[in-house]
Amino acid sequence: MASEAQLEQQIGQLSDWLHERVLTPWKIEELQRELLLHLRQYELNVYRMQIGMPMLHPLYSIGTYIWKQDRGSYQETYGRGSDKDDAWQKSPIKPMYEAGLNERCFRLQDSEAEQFPMLVELRDEGVTEHLVQVAGFSDRSIPTDEQEGVVLTWSTTDADGFTETQIKLLSRLRLPLSALVKGLAQRKLTVDILDTYLGSYSGSRVLSGKIQRGDVEMINAVIFFCDLRDSSVLAKEYSPKAFLDLLNQYYEVTAGTVEKHGGEVLRFIGDASLAIFPIQKFDSDSTACKKALDASKEALRLCDQLNEKRKRLGEQQIKFGIGLHKGEVLYGNMGIPTRLEFTVIGEAANEAARIEGMCKELGETVLVSKIFSECVASNWVSHGRHKLKNIADEIEVLSPVFS
């Protein structure tokens, strides 16, 4: 057993190591793995280690980072609603949290462990002792996902569990480790929010410092413009909430498919969406065009499936038009000093919107420009050249024949 002086030296070394990495933009999983390597130097056999905290996310309320000897690092999330509540009711964290404790050890051979399915599962894997720590969560009368805090858990398979010295070491690590984890989580939260509201392509530029009005560049991109049909009629027929549900279904099969194929949704304009497939993100113009065309094809397929369900429910069908074009656009921060957005402007963006506007007139769901069609092999049907509103030159538009 380490002496008090040795223990203080170990704690000091680990604390210094943690503080040195406060400003390092690494991931929580990397921190977790390196920390466990350091702990091995002190003969601390950790079988499983978990870091959990509330998430600001539209789908999930709790996120966890887990490391196990036989699996390495992986993540788990708990959704909002009944699933999360059920997991909380069965968690060994709940009684200690509600009792106002910051730390508690569970001996898995004790009868108390039988109350918690997770501890029974760990015991079956050979775990002998499970240490739970919490930091933050100043008001224990409200749920964990409604306030700031970090949960740490440590499991060992050593026959006698953790030693007294090991418990002291982990106890002293609770606050500095939680502070570092929280800092890394805030950075990840920033990335997640930027990805959600700007998209990963634009969000990465904001994180890299492109945050001033006028931070723009000319880029070559495929422009994807999509608009809902008969939206005014639908808005009158449905309640506001029902119409919003319809819009979200429409966006999932259109804008959601764009993201799935590597595109970047820049704006939702009422019931229309503007997206790009930046050429520099792909290996060629033809690849970017093919991705955009594949996204359009899948959007049609998914919408057909959705409309079958809506038909069975007696709901109105969802119809839309998609315009695809390729060209140079001005991409970057625009707006007023206190309210900016990442978007694209330029003749090519306007042309894509006008091409989509021809869909209803020509009875097509997807229309593309001649420039676009020349970049990707497909069965094309030409609809001739057309004079588009506010566009100087006539543009030939074509529709794909999807097999």
Image: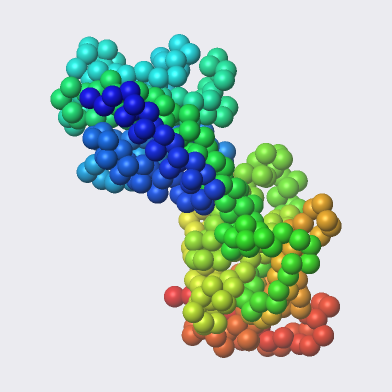
Q: Position of residue 216 (x, y in %)?
A: 73, 70
Q: Position of residue 78 (x, y in %)?
A: 44, 35
Q: Quadrant of residue 349?
A: bottom right
Q: Which residue is painted at 48% across and 13% down in the image?
A: 100
Left or right of 292 on screen, residue 103: left
Q: Which residue is painted at 33% across and 23% down in the image?
A: 4
Q: Which residue is painted at 48% across and 29% down in the image?
A: 175
Q: Quadrant of residue 241?
A: top right
Q: Nearer the viewer, residue 288 or 105?
A: 105
| Residue 6 seen by the camera | yes
- Number of marks present in the image shown: 0
Left or right of 387 on screen, residue 191: left
Q: Which residue is painted at 32% across and 19% down in the image?
A: 105
Q: Residue furthest front?
A: 5
Q: Nearer the viewer, residue 125 or 81?
A: 125
Q: Position of residue 315 (x, y in %)?
A: 59, 46
Is 239 situated above or below 288? above
Q: Nearer the viewer, residue 345 or 227?
A: 345
Is 194 situated above or below 282? above
Q: Position of residue 125 (x, y in %)?
A: 19, 32
The C terminus lies in quadrant: bottom left
The N terminus lies in quadrant: top left
Is 260 situated above or below 13? below
| Residue 74 seen by the camera | no
How does the figure colour the protein chain or chains? rainbow
Q: Quadrant of residue 318?
A: bottom right
Q: Nearer the viewer, residue 376 or 23?
A: 23
Is 330 situated above or below 138? below
